[in-house]
Amino acid sequence: MLPTAEPTPTPTGDAPPRATVIALHDRGQAGRLSRLATQALLAEVELSPKPGLVDPVSCGAHDDMDAETFRASITAIAPWFPVLHETGRAGHRDAPSRFLQRLRRPGMGCEDAMFAATRGVNTHKGAVFAFGLLLGCAGRLAAGGLPVTARSLTDLAARMARPLVEVELPAVECPGTYGEAAFVEHRLAGARGEAAGGYASVRRHALPAYRAVLEATGDGRGAMLQALLVLMATTDDTTLVKDGSLDGLRHVQRSARDLLGAGGVRAPDALTRLHRLDVDLTRRGLSPGGCADLLAVTHFLAHLPSGAD
């Protein structure tokens, strides 16, 4: 039986982030963080223009999904977020491998809910992995009496996810996903590597870019688009590694770097350039879905206390 859904919040991509204060041992924490995760996913799908990706005015490089598919998916997976948080709380004494195993059952339930809502279309598998881990780690921190900040959360996620790249990926012999194939052929660790690295692409690149635009302009949409471009330029997105070739990935990275070199979202013709890149990636069948997942993680972490060094 699926958990009961809370009312779906509206996306907050156009509003300056306000850090959510997370009290220790607060049983309402699961609900608050789950709402932030849901808002982050909504903000990502409603953002436009996103080159190669689904948004409210374009299906990007996809012919099997649109923005409504993503909205239905978010509605289906959101009720599982508090479950993942509470699962992490229950496993706060687990070793990393055991902790990951504990999170897998509700994680698979969340995936099943997504596929049921989308009739088999993969809209958020990567996001389910990222937010399942982050929310589980938040529950673990809270149960241990530790503050939930962007820094503490990503540090713990790195420690918990390390077995994925140190044990699981090296053991893959017959790749079943683009991510596994990218590791076997090119040693790119994909979503698992991002997690095991403490979401360094977000912390070191996307979050600073997001905050810089937001502080300078107050424009949440522009901040999100800048963060997306930075992620596209710097991330080895394994959803772009198709047929064993790195050509698509490198093309996306070069194109995003060109846009950033021209001024990014603060260039006078920024929207025109983004639309042109959308047309280009759509024609090539390239959709940087891993970057979209990390953009949602960026939005989520931006609304937590930083816990900076």
Image: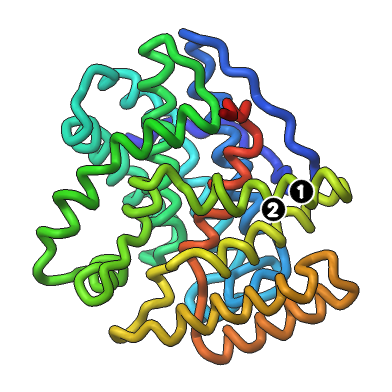
Q: Is residue 25 above or below residue 299?
A: above
Q: Is residue 255 above or below residue 227?
A: below
Residue 209 marker = 2
Label 1 vs label 2: CA separation? 5 Å
Q: Residue furthest bottom?
A: 283
**In which quarter of the view is residue 93 placed?**
top left
Quarter of the rendering containing residue 259: bottom right
Residue name at image x 67 percent, y 82 percent: 277
Q: Position of residue 17 (x, y in %)?
A: 74, 36
Q: Which residue is mark 1?
A: 212
The answer to which of 243 and 46 lies nearer the viewer is 243
What type is the residue that disc 2 sits on?
A: Ala
Q: CB under 8 Å between callouts 1 and 2?
A: yes
- Residue at 57% across, 17% down: 22
Specify few, some or many for label 2: CA neighbours under 10 Å numbering under 14, 14-19, or 20 or more. many
Please say if 201 is above or below 16: below
